[in-house]
Structure formats: C-alpha cells, structure tokens
Amino acid sequence: MITQRRAGLRMVALAVGIFAFVGTATAETRHGIAMYGDPALPPDFVSLPQVNPDAPKGGTYRWGEAGSFDSFNPYVTKGRPASGISALTVETLMGRNYDEAFSLYGLLAESIDTDAARTYVEFTLRPEARFSDGSPVTVEDVMWSMETLGTQGNPRYAGAWKKIASMEKTGERSVRFTFNVEDRELPLILGLRPILKKAQWQGKNFAEATMEVPVGSGPYTLAASDLGVQVTYNRNPDWWGKDLPFNRGQWNFDTIRYDYYANPQAIFEAFKAGQVSAYREANVSKWLSSYDFPAVQSGDVIKAEIPHGRPSGIEGFVFNTRKAIFADWRVREALILAFNFEFINQTLNGGLLPRIPSYFGNSDLGMDPGKPAQGRELELLAPFKADLLPGAIEGYALPVASGDQANRKNIRAAAKLLEEAGWTVGEDGVLKNAGGEPFSFEILLVTGQDELASTAEVYIEALKALGITATLNKIDDAQYKERTTAYDFDMTHYIRSLSLSPGNEQLLYWGAGGVTEPGTRNWMGVNSPAVEAMIAAMLKAPDRSEFIAATKALDRVLTSGRYVIPIWYSDVSRLAYAADLKYPEKLPLYGDWTGFLPDTWWQEAR
C-alpha cells in the first residue's frame, strides 16, 4: 500500500521527470562509487587493501564501555543503545573503504547506478542477501527502512529523506531514489543507511526505545545480554555475506563482547586484570608513565601507536549559546582567553600534544589560522561579510598564553572584552551585568571523566581572576544523555570526529534546525546562514578543489564563531592490547577509527 507521503513523492518525481530522464541517459552501473572521481578498487578486487585476507577465524574480543544501556534500537533518539548492535548485526547497501577518503563498494547491493549530476541513484540487491532468520532482503525492506528512518528515526536521518523526490521499485531486486536538490553526496548517504526487516516492525512504534533486537543481515547475532552490564555477539556461521570480497579478512572473531563499567578508570583496571582485550589511552602522560604493570613487562600486553591522516576534529568545552550568558561572541572570546591551554597541556600532557587549531585542522580541509581568506574561499564568504564575526575573513587564531599559571596578559584582554560586552566587576569582586546579575555557570561532565575534570578545575580557578563563578557538576551517563539531548547545560565536554569527506552530517552538527530540535549534534546552538551556505557549497561542489575551498570557508566560520574552547589532539591513536590479538601490517588511511578495531583484527594463540 502506498502512503500519502510516498504518493506525494512520486507526484514530485513527475514534475522533475525530464531532469531525471536526462540524468539516466548518462548513467553507468558500477560496483562502487566515490565522492569524487572513481573508487580506487576495480570490480574484480579480492579484498580491501588494509586487511589480512587470510586472517584466521575464531577467538573472543572483549571491549569495555563506560556507562550503561537500556535499548537495542540505536536508530531513534530515545534510550541509550547497546554498543555494537548496529555495526555488528545490521548491514547496509554498500560498505565504506576506510583506506580512501570516501568510497563505497557493494554489500547488500551488487551494483549502484547514477548519472554524472547524481540526480538519482538506483541500487540492485544481491539475490543471495539474507537476514539472519534466513528470509531474503527485499526492495520492500529497503524502501520501508529509508522512509521509517527518515520520518521516525533519529534526526540524523531526516535531512537526506527530505531531499528524496521519489522512490520506486524498478525491478524485482532494484530500487530508485530521485532527488529534489543538487547534492552529490546523497547516493553515498543512502548507500550507508541500515536496512531493517520491515515485517519485524509491523504494528510497533519504531520511535520508542526497545529491548527487542533488530533482525539484521550482518556478520553477528546477539547471543546474550544483561541489561546495562554486558552484551555478547556471536559470529553467524550462516552469514550470507561471509564470502564477499569486501568482507574477506574482516569480522574474524567468533565472539565480540561489550562489558559496561562505571568509568574509564574502572575499564583500565579491568584491562590490566585481563578482563578487557584492548584499551585506548587518550592521556599521553599516562601512556608514558602508567603502562609498566606486569602484563606489559611480561609481553602479554602490547603497546602500539597507530598513525592516521584524518582531520583533528573538534574537542573541548562547548558554549551553549542558547543561554543568554554566552550569546555575545566577546564573552566567548574572553572565556577562551582565560583558558590557559599551555599551562594545562604542560601539567596534564607534559606539553606533548598540539592544540586543535580549527575544526578541520591537520588536513588540507582546514583553514590557515591567522591568515586572511583568499581566492575561492573569499568569494564564498563575501556575501555574508556583514554578518560574520571578526576573524572569519581577516584571519583568526586561538590565543596563546605565556605558559605560566597566572596568564596575566590574556586575563587582562579577557576583562576588557567582558567590559565591552556589559560585564563589570563590582566592589565585592563579582563580575555582574547591568542588571546586577552575577556571571556564573555550570560545567557539566560525566562521572569518571577525570582528566577533563582536572582541566575544568584549573579553568574554574583561573576564572576567579575575572570575578566569574563556575562550578563543576559530574553526573551519571544516563542523566548526561538526557540533559545533552535537551541541550540542558551551560558548558560541557564536546567532541566531534571529522572525516576527510565531510558532507550532509555537517547540517546535523551545525545546522540551524538543531537550535530548537532536540537530539541533534549542534550542542552549541549554531544559527548561521553562512554555515549552511558553506555546507550547501560543499554538497554541490563538482570537483575536489571546489569542495576544499567550501570546507575551508566553513572551517573559518565555525572557528571564528568561538563556539568551543578547543583542547588538544593527537595524530596517532595509542592502543594497548592483549598479545594474542593481531592487526594487518597495512594501516588504513583513517587509522584507528571506524572499520579498524575489531573489524580487521584477529586472534592467534601465542
């Protein structure tokens, strides 16, 4: 039965029929697709380059997670989903090769068909594709999944759904999506949508958190779980996709288990005791000083530094600009000045980690800090010049402190900015606005974020020199998710990892819809026409050079927006792991990221 929504979409498709027809004339059915140019691997590739195609199967991998879980539905806003449920048990139409910036190859779909302008995309399913219960993956499952995720799922799915003019079954195993906007990334976005079994959800409210496990077509099935304590997956011996070239050398463990702990320190202790298979160390000082326990000395635990080529991303303390206290950019700049990065970095990291310079730093997508916009970047930003904050066009770089604890020069500059913004220190030493209201706010963290808590405590002490009262509040994981989903915080820890091919997800991160719509990743409340225009330019970019210019321009607007107090980043991932675990010699371009651990690892007896 065709819903009103779908019928409406097909009517729109008729209106753009000529547009779609022209596109079809130049279409080409392919085994894969890249954001720009051609995918690196040929149609007859035998495995991904960053795997060991002969890796043995078997063994168990255990990972520690902080917090808890109360849902097996990771596709909606409600609840905290169990780790692994989507990545391990549910498959997508196409799979991403993390040794390329952004290229996909067929998984559930044996081929992809689009035109040069990417006005539509058509996927043809593999005849052998099956759900874990043995039933075939059908076009109806694909269409239902796309519509349900787009209308009832997490907001991250809604943007792409709104750009679909029509979807139609074009054959027994093929489905076509025609688009109503110019967006070169859409075929890839739809290729990565999880495909669920339509029949499982009939008569049920998909938008609710649930402990019912999705019936998927991925390499694993749920074997056991203990609510909020552990979840275990077993490799499906009847997995339909085990012999695909894309999957060769991947998903080698027989069992993957996630154990939940109160905080990262508890996970580390469990790792030292041999109860967890691997541990990522984010603190470089601890990496150098805390890994002399017996298992390391005996060789039972290996330390490795995994390099990567991805952008720095953004991490630090985010301002919630929905709050009046942080609405003025001068206030945010003042609080950035008061953050003594050099002193904190020396204290916690021995000064070994560089500061994040911008959202896309450490890559060719990042702006040049402190330098003015030129060429195509300037052309893209020029229409918004009157509304951009100081530094967006002229050049902006984060302030540098002298390194001593007092940070006097930056504190004086901060005080001046606060005064310009209407905040003055009274005789009682308290910073107040014209209405006599004191400048005070809360820094919200999760219990167990000890390093960040130490950073916040140093910062809170520094703010006293400005007459500002900040307090640190540490809450449990469930409360934290609830509050951040509703943007119920003043300042909190913020981290967004960014890829070498940013696209539609940028609207979820910084799009104006997230100012009021709960559950997006726009925690800071960015509301900028320039930001949305730069994202649109990225999505429409006909080639890599235009794409880079648009991304650099976006980086300028975001960084000069002073939404986050950036901390440090690392161009390597520090992994400690049990010696019987192995990984391929060829490391992927993205390093230790999605698609690496546990995807390409295996276990060998010592």
Image (cartoon, rainbow, N blue to C red):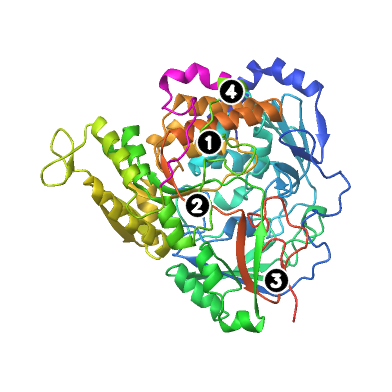
Report the mark closest to the observer, 1 or 3.
1
Three-letter code, disc 2: Trp
The label shown at residue 528 is none
| Alpha carbon distance from label 1 to label 3 | 48 Å
- Residue identifier under label 4: 374
For the record, the magenta segment spans 379-401
According to the picture, the residue beneath numbered tag 1 turns out to be 369
Front residue (pair 303, 502): 303
Q: Do the residues bearing badges 2 and 4 touch, measured as CB atoms within 8 Å? A: no
Label 2 – label 4 distance at C-alpha: 27 Å
Neighbour tally class for label 1: few under 14, some 14-19, many 20 plus, Cα within 10 Å: some
User: Which quarter of the picture shows residue 415?
Assistant: top left
Residue 70 in view of the camera: no
User: Quick one: which residue is furthest to the left in this view?
Assistant: 427
Q: Quadrant of the C terminus?
A: bottom right
Q: In the image, 405: left or right of 117?
A: left
Which numbered circle lies on residue 568?
A: 2
Mark closer to the chain start, 2 or 3: 3
> Dot 4 lies on which element?
loop
Label 2 vs label 1, nearer the camera: 1
Q: Are marks 1 and 3 in contact (CB under 8 Å)?
A: no
